[in-house]
Amino acid sequence: MEMKAEFKRKGGGKVKLVVGMTGATGAIFGVRLLEWLKAAGVETHLVVSPWANVTIKHETGYTLKEVEQLATFTYSHKDQAAAISSGSFDTDGMIVAPCSMKSLASIRTGMADNLLTRAADVMLKERKKLVLLTRETPLNQIHLENMLALTKMGTIILPPMPAFYNQPSSLEEMVDHIVFRTLDQFGIRLPEAKRWNGIEKQKGGA
């Protein structure tokens, strides 16, 4: 996974993103996100919840240490004095991948009781981009109302739903499609992403 150029801010300098991983199923989305961000030269600030650590070990072939090595900086979820807990910290936004319904509810209500939810709260108060890869099915009224409330606050709710129009041949391709769509929200448009160009072009027609 190599890229010829790094993604930069419009005024120069590295793009900086906060990445949170919660205990919802779908840890691979957070892992692949970090891998692609590292390849793109994006500075990442990672916070992993205790249950995300459990899910990483259960669902992937990675250890927590290996995941943390993909990030530029890492923080304990208990460290409320970390750099990313302040609105004065310079960042371009935050992605929570995956985002559990518990974390969704905490973010919606402003219950910043750990560094992950505090960092998300900072994004809301500073009017910075916050993208949540919400993982649950089926959804109840509470889940939907929390998503709607956060959407009204400017949050992007991005459930990791697979796309089949690009005819994926592996689970990795399906995961990467979600990661690419997530990065699109920050203007990070990776050349590896397969994009829809109309059904005739997808079939190889004119």
Image (tube, helix red, strand yellow):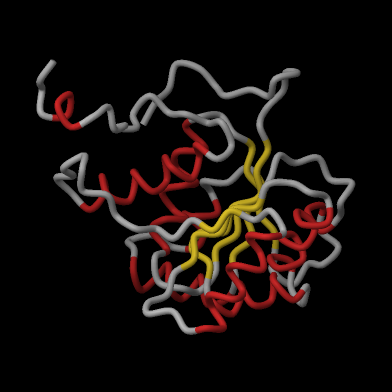
- Name above or below for residue 159 compared with residue 204: below
The image shows residue 13 at horizontal and vertical percentages of: 72, 23
- Name above or below for residue 126 compared with residue 49: above
Q: Is residue 57 left or right of residue 21?
A: left
User: Image quadrant for the C terminus?
Assistant: top left
The image shows residue 200 at horizontal and vertical percentages of: 14, 26
Q: Is residue 100 left or right of residue 153?
A: left
- Name above or below for residue 120 compared with residue 136: above
Tell me the quarter of the picture where residue 192 sits: top left
Please tell me which residue is depicted at 60% across the width and 59% down the height of the picture: 20
The front one of 21 and 144 is: 144
User: Image quadrant for the N terminus?
Assistant: top left
Tell me the quarter of the picture where residue 29 sits: bottom left
Q: Is residue 55 left or right of residue 168?
A: right
Please tell me which residue is depicted at 50% across the width and 74% down the height of the picture: 23
The front one of 90 and 186 is: 186
The image shows residue 172 at horizontal and vertical percentages of: 26, 48
Q: Is residue 72 left or right of residue 178?
A: right
**Is residue 112 in view?**
no
- Name above or below for residue 105 compared with residue 42: below
Please tell me which residue is depicted at 65% across the width and 50% down the height of the picture: 94
Tell me the quarter of the picture where residue 68 sits: bottom right
Please tell me which residue is depicted at 68% across the width and 60% down the height of the picture: 152
